[in-house]
Image (cartoon, helix red, strand yellow):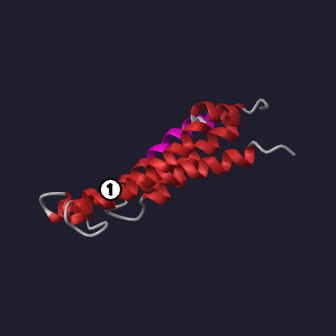
Amino acid sequence: MGDDRVLRVIARLLIPFILLFALYVQFHGDYGPGGGFQAGVIFAAGIILYALTYGVEAAMRLVPRRLLAPLAALGVLLYGGVGVATMVLGGKFLDYSVLAHDPLHGQHYGILLIELGVGITVAAVMLLIFFAFMSREG
């Protein structure tokens, strides 16, 4: 990388706020606009900004590539696991109301877990795609 001090300083200031905003969107998605998909994309964008500023190798050290595929699978398993758990508890697939003593609390827990699974999967897959494109030669 060149001598891009201004870019590095601005990125160093912005990246924590980008990641914090991704968490806000993730956990605010059940009350307003947002949710797992948007949060996953924002989180991945923060890591991609880091990669573009400090180099892809530095980003791969920060988020190892070998960790991303299991994270993507974990998000899908979390999504599906919530559905299976609702069936085991006597409800229909993804009928969140059976997840807690009160149907309203069950809805809240269910959507929170589902959106978390989506967010983890989207962030991991976006980073896998970015790293795949950046590691191509030619």
In the image, what residue occupies the spot 79% across and 31% down?
2
Residue where numbered disc 1 is placed: 112
The picture places residue 136, in percent across and down from the top left corner, at 79, 45
Residue at image coords 70%, 37%: 56
- Is residue 12 in the magenta section? yes
Residue type, numbered disc 1: Leu
The question of residue 116 being in magenta is answered with no
Label 1 neighbourhood size at 10 Å, few (<14), some (14-19), many (20+)? some
Tell me where the magenta segment starts and ends, as one range. 9-20
The residue closer to the viewer here, 52 or 113, is 113
Residue 34, quarter of the rendered image = bottom left
Query: Looking at the picture, does residue 108 appear above or below residue 69?
Result: below
Q: Quadrant of residue 102?
A: bottom left
The chief SS type of the magenta part is: helix
Using residue 116 as the reference point, say whether residue 138 is left or right of it: right
Can residue 22 be seen here? The reply is no
Q: Is label 1 in a helix, a strand or a loop?
A: helix
Q: Position of residue 108 (x, y in %)?
A: 25, 60
Tell me residue 94's x, y (percent): 31, 66
Decide if residue 100 is in sight here.
yes
Is 50 on the left-hand or right-hand side of 32? right
Q: Residue at x 26, y 68 (%)?
A: 95
Q: Quadrant of the N terminus?
A: top right
Q: As drawn, is 118 to the left or to the right of 106?
A: right
| Residue placed furthest toward the front | 88
